[in-house]
Amino acid sequence: MNRLNRLMTGLASAALVVAATTALAKDDITVAMQLEPPHLDPTSAAAGAIDSVLYTNVFEGLTRFMGDGSVVPGLAESWEISEDGLTYTFKLREGVTFHDGTTMDAEDVKFTLDRINAEDSANAQKALYSAISEVNVIDPQTVEVKLSEPNGNMLFNLAWGDAVIVAPESVETIKQTPIGTGAFKFENWNQGDKITLTRNEDYWGEAPALASATFKFISDPTAAFASVMAEDVDVFTGFPAPENIPQFEADPRFQVLIGSTEGETILSINNQRAPFDNVKVREAVAHAIDRQAIIDGAMFGYGTPIGTHFAPHNPDYVDLTEMSSYDPEKSKVLLAEAGFPDGFETTLHLPPPSYARRGGEIIAAQLAEVGIKAQITNVEWAQWLETVFKGKDFGLSIVSHTEPMDINIYANPDYYFQYDNAEFQSLMTEFNKTADPAARSEMLAKAQRIIAEDYVNGYLFQLAFPTIAKAGVEGLWVNAPTQATDLTGVSWAE
């Protein structure tokens, strides 16, 4: 019997050792997020959910963003800029291959940048790269990018997901089968459920600790809470139920990361659709909105009020919230002066995120108090992109613009809210040409004031970025300088 006991004890100890070793060796992760990408090509859509899954993981650009917002070398290991600021010469890293085994070289860079500026380009941020007049291959590892005018933002712009490098051989199927150069390879997309990535064993850089990653899509806030509490997922980025955050903060199984984003959450206004083509009407809308009530009611206090399209954590931010302070009586006076003493009816398109659906109910009630009857239409993300963003068929909408320092979108009269101001466009053109930091800061301050004075949109709040993760997960981005879930430096604590 003693021998049997010793044998059983030994087997139990061995099992514990194996279990402990397995726990230490955990190399997979399940990350949940609210929105599912409409497709998987970051270079031909405005949907940030694409970057949330693929940026740095699957696709890489010449430069890239880090978690602190800095821009560092990516596929370009170095570069030189001519004295006149018109020529950028990039030296590419050696030994980089796409996931299909083909070599990434200067021809692929030329193809990518030419494709962005092609006449039939579907790139959502094409305007960022319009100064690129010519791309020349010097040799396989060297590419020359010529500009028609200096652009002080070019290295920053090249770090966006819209400028990741793709191969001509893969673009026909890129929306369903993305092939990049990143540390992870696309494995599978079970639409409506999840996307699976696996480690790229031939990655040019430091190998990631994770062997595989699964992105789960859970749109319902209640289901999101349940999935995290049940530990069905390891991480939930952009957690959509802020009212539940205190429960996770009190539970030692989890860590709660509250970061900032580049997400200016706005009540988008169709500036070319009557009656919003009247600045007094837009101002009336602005004064009808109680930002803090929206932050408290929809976001449970998580969010920073904004008065223009600029991130409060940016050193060049100007606080203009008083220009559009909550003043329903002033709103009624402005409506009367604009010829709408009894208000009017309009539409309010709401995409799936909680800030939109929950915030939309509050805003509709606030607008009703001054006589503006906003008919709510809940739409899925693909519908929003098609109807609002592309079709411009809306009166009002709510969306968070998560692209970094994107005030330049107001210089594009064809952008979905259709703001057309020659002074602003001229200012942004001059800004792009300017390298002097003090002059650029002055121009950004002026740009913020112009769009605030024109009441282009209703400026609500800067979106907070709550992430709930199991206690053992390390290396996650706290802030979101761009919409990304960078897993290249993520691991499990030993």
Image (cartoon, rainbow, N blue to C red):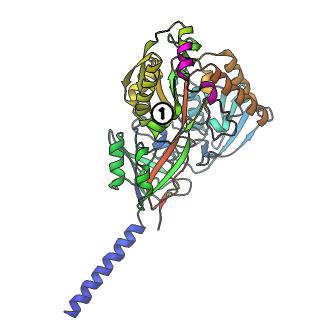
Residue 379 picture location, percent across and down: 37, 27
Question: Magenta part of the protein: which range?
Answer: 310-333
Q: In the rendered structure, does residue 326 fall within the stretch colored magenta?
A: yes
Identified at 40% across, 43% down, the residue is 241
Figure check: 9 above or below 489: below
Q: Which residue is at the front of the view, 191 or 187? A: 191
Identified at 41% across, 36% down, the residue is 354
Residue 26 picture location, percent across and down: 41, 63
Say which quarter of the image contains residue 191.
top left
In the displayed structure image, the side of residue 50 where residue 151 appears, left or right: right
Figure check: 289 above or below 470: above
Residue 49 is at least partly visible in this image = no
Q: Mark 1 belongs to which amino acid?
A: Ile
Farthest residue, direction bottom: 2
Q: Secondary structure at mark 1?
A: helix
Residue 219 is at least partly visible in this image = yes
Farthest residue, direction left: 1
Farthest residue, direction right: 83
